Image (cartoon, rainbow, N blue to C red):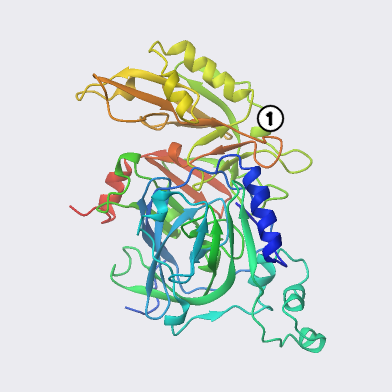
Amino acid sequence: MATPFTNMNPFFILLLIAFLSFNQTLARQRPISTTSLVLGMRHSRSSIRSPVSSSNSNKIPSQVLDLMEPLREVRDGYLISLNLGTPPQVIQVYMDTGSDLPWVPCGNLSFSCMDCDDYYRNNKLNPTFSPSVSSSSVRDLCGSPFCTDIHSSDNPLDPCTIAGCSLSTLIKGTCPRPCPSFAYTYGAGGVVVGTLSRDTLRVHGTSSSPSNVTSEIPSFCFGCIGSTFREPIGIAGFGRGPLSLPSQLGFLQKGFSHCFLAFKYVNNPNISSPLVIGDVAISSKQNLQFTPMLKSPIYPNNYYIGLEAITIGNNSITQVSLSLREFDSQGNGGMLIDSGTTYTHLPEPFYSDVLSVLQSLITYPRAKEMEMKTSFDLCYKVPYTTNAFTDELFPSITFHFLNNVSLGLPQGNHFYAMGAPINSTVVKCLLFQTMDDGDYGPAGVFGSFQQQNVEVVYDLQKDRIGFQAMDCASAAASQGLHKR
């Protein structure tokens, strides 16, 4: 989730970055006649993005009906490959349901990322996009509705005014100047600075079309980012704003689904999580339970659901704050479902209640030293054997959402090993965290780690989200996303 800023100058950027740092809280070419898209993803980030308030969506016509791409799992999230430019350049970016802007790092040597850890600095995982070598690359113009949206303006003349257009060209709508530079911030403190560009995007069809056929999407609009703060890899925003990837492909009246692979497949190049966009994603889903999407009055582009209770073993915690299933008069509250936030976050005192029930049911010794080394509050030393899943030694955890929807977390989605076993013992920690600043924005977040081995369907036609526990590795194999 993100907030754009305009009229940027270097001094302001430094002040903004300093402020955000101080307040950091966590983190071949013919049209397809199909109706869906399937993509493949990878896994990454553990920060909470703050929602973006945006103007009404501008529907973009598209010939694409359904799409399928692979999502490859990396350390903190799931990556989707964007084929941009002429000739195509393949750039891997995070799939993020918590923001709108699609952006890629631009420039070979010029792209820079401040405060990015060595894992990303030394990893050649993600090349940068070079507009100069793409014959179809152009800057977006200041009169574009995308430019108005990225600058969060209610007046479509504002960006062209900032760009220095004359009054006569403003009135006639003929100013040829490019959209001014922008800054876009994420709730965990990340900042990206760059310009809006347009270029050809190529996507893949589903099984109703030959898999080797791609569709060209001309004039796809995205951020061409030259510098960032704590954002080393690009992002494909899947929110409901006009700039998001589903919006520009014409899928906001349809939907999409994903099935995230388990964490054990991190950095495995031979298997990808299936991401389906279009009719196929939302059809024939009778076996799923659907909970209604909550509509935030101030963050309409993000996906919210309502949490009613959590059951741990046979113990049901029903004293859930109303803020987790409704919004207050300022629009704060609800439970954000976000692929860009790794771990589920719960507000106090509900989070402490969950910890208390777990502690009363688990008899293994606490691993206090691991709790001190990590940001996790509940870690245990449990016996390790190669013939059994140690996750079964922990009580089950079930989330109960509005409309009587219950999702039992698959094994491995709550406690996870922090390292290799030592002396037949392994340390496992609860991968939930407390929700900081719970009085502002979402009251809680349902993170991607808890969505592993779960088919999640975003039915945008009926404003609902469906859940079904599933072996996502088997789903990937059935989609041809597992290389043996």
Instruction: Kindly identify the residue that appears in the image at 33 percent across and 45 percent down.
Output: 266
Q: Quadrant of residue 127?
A: bottom left
329 lies left or right of 452: right
Instruction: Kindly identify the residue that appears in the image at 31 percent across and 78 percent down.
Output: 28
Question: Which element is circle 1 on?
Answer: helix
Q: Position of residue 57 (x, y in %)?
A: 65, 64
The residue beneath circle 1 is 322
183 lies left or right of 212: right
Q: Position of residue 370 (x, y in %)?
A: 42, 24
133 lies left or right of 445: left
For this orientation, the residue located farthest to the left is: 484
* 428 versus 287 height, above or below: above
Q: Position of residue 276 (x, y in %)?
A: 41, 56
264 lies left or right of 319: left
**Relative to the observer, which residue lies in front, 19 or 329?**
19
**Relative to the observer, which residue lies in front, 398 or 237?**
237
**Relative to the observer, which residue lies in front, 425 or 53?**
425
